[in-house]
Image: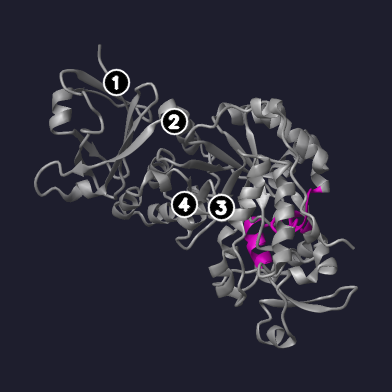
Amino acid sequence: MRRLAEKVPTTPHRSGSEEASLPHLPRYPALYQINTRVWLTELSRRLGRPAMLDDIPDAELDRLAELGFDWIWFLSVWQTGPAGRLVSRSNAGWRRGFEATLPDLCDDDIGGSGFAISAYETHSALGGNEALARLRERLRARGLRLMLDFVPNHSALDHPWVEEHPEYYVDGTELDLARSPDNYTRVSRCGGDLVLAHGRDPYFPGWSDVLQLNYGNPATQDAMLGELLKVAGRCDGVRCDMAMLILPEVFERTWGIASRPFWPEAIRRVREQAPDFCFLAEVYWDLEWTLQQQGFDYTYDKRLYDRLRDRHAGPVRDHLRAGLDYQDRLARFLENHDEPRAAATFPPGVHEAAAVITYLSPGLRFFQMGQFQGRRTHVSPHLCRAPDEPVNPEVQRFYIGLLAVVRSPALRDGRWQLLDCAAAWEGNWTSDGFIAFAWQGPDGERMLVAVNYADNQGQCCVRLAPVFTELGGRTWRLRDLLGPAVHDRDGDDLEARGLFLDLKPMGYHAFEVAPIG
């Protein structure tokens, strides 16, 4: 049988008409994550039959385009196998978690992890590769780009490589299996049983539904490059699961195996075929900059999320002092399929304030299906069904307003600057709770965002000069795009003293700043 490492498949070139059908991406785009299997399960109920990708209504895609998204990430479209599904259904600890999500759980609700991939082919239950291609064209017709998963660290237990190329995996001994049964498993093969390692990171036990790929083997890297190039022919970007695990220093720390870097060459090869292809890295442990330097367009900003969750303004403000060469390439979120729901993590007032900071800052704005409705139940990627939850009208109204601001030219293509917040008077310490920044749009639009990210009433003077120039000699109207406030202020005073603000705990403004007359 031909070794996959002997010849790496190439990605078909896109035609000029395909490229022309997509608008130019703004500097700060927006991404929407869809749990594909959950969404189609909900659609199946309405249709009275199993729904596939072709059944996704055009009206739903129209709605996503109208909301201002540039990227749609369809989670878990690739083929998975019965081995992973069996593990998901039989793992007692996981099943307890599934039952907490779905009290009426049945086996059909457990599809197996979408990250236990047996082939980078569109799952047959979703309609196969042809249905995915049609969905991509429908998205492109609306100016939307398709993002899909790429899982570099591991494969499904029943991936064909287990039989055909066991050398692609980290192997073990009977002693390894006896000493560390959470990290190794015995695999039955026609070619003879083997002990192979489960995929894992260095801080937790292995994931029992997947096997660890060996990046110390150049043939494994070549084979995974071939898979990545295949994926890149079917979408416009990939979200790379736990992308830092295959960095040579991390891989050697985890497995004691030296390896060469994968990402720089892999990204280069993909972009030879698709120059505008996008790479988004799930990454932690302060390795965001490392992966940006290796070619990733965006990296998860878990640090901002953690600091907002801890509810201390100072660390948030310090994080926003980083250079834009770094911040512009951060993917900023309040929830995703790995994190608990924002509505359950952040109390109502805190939720809104944290969202204003997250999504009105520079970077890729990353939202998840159900976030706008205030869903509170986290749904594991092993599940194909979510619980029925009522829409929270207050959360929904807030996000409708926030997305309107995110769609503004100043937020999509403008220049951003963090602002200083001085004490409103001597001895007033409450200015420490403020985070403020300015946007200037491509046509001269000005916007001021200020949040009192504290549990107490606070006052400050936001220093607008020298970021906002030529304020003097005019009156300026500040109209809050997220609330009813409208203020007229003298430009000379704004230049000299700044803008005085008095905000309730977790209060915020997103002011449009324009001259009167």
Amino acid marked by disc 4? Asp
Q: Quadrant of the C terminus?
A: top left
**Reading the chain from its start, which is encountered first: label 4 or label 1?**
4
Q: Residue at x 44, y 30 (%)?
A: 413
Q: Residue at x 43, y 42 (%)?
A: 355
Mark 1 or 3, which is nearer the eye? Answer: 3
**Reading the chain from its start, which is encountered first: label 2 or label 1?**
2
Q: Quadrant of the N terminus?
A: bottom right
Q: Is residue 113 magenta?
A: yes
Amino acid marked by disc 1? Ala
**Is 220 above or below relative to 122?**
below
Percent from the top left, x then y, of residue 84? 76, 63
Can see residue 169? Answer: yes
Label 2 and label 4: CA atoms lie apart by 20 Å
Q: Which mark is residue 301?
A: 4
Q: Residue at x 60, y 28 (%)?
A: 65
Q: Is residue 365 left or right of residue 90?
A: left
**Is 47 above or below relative to 335?**
above
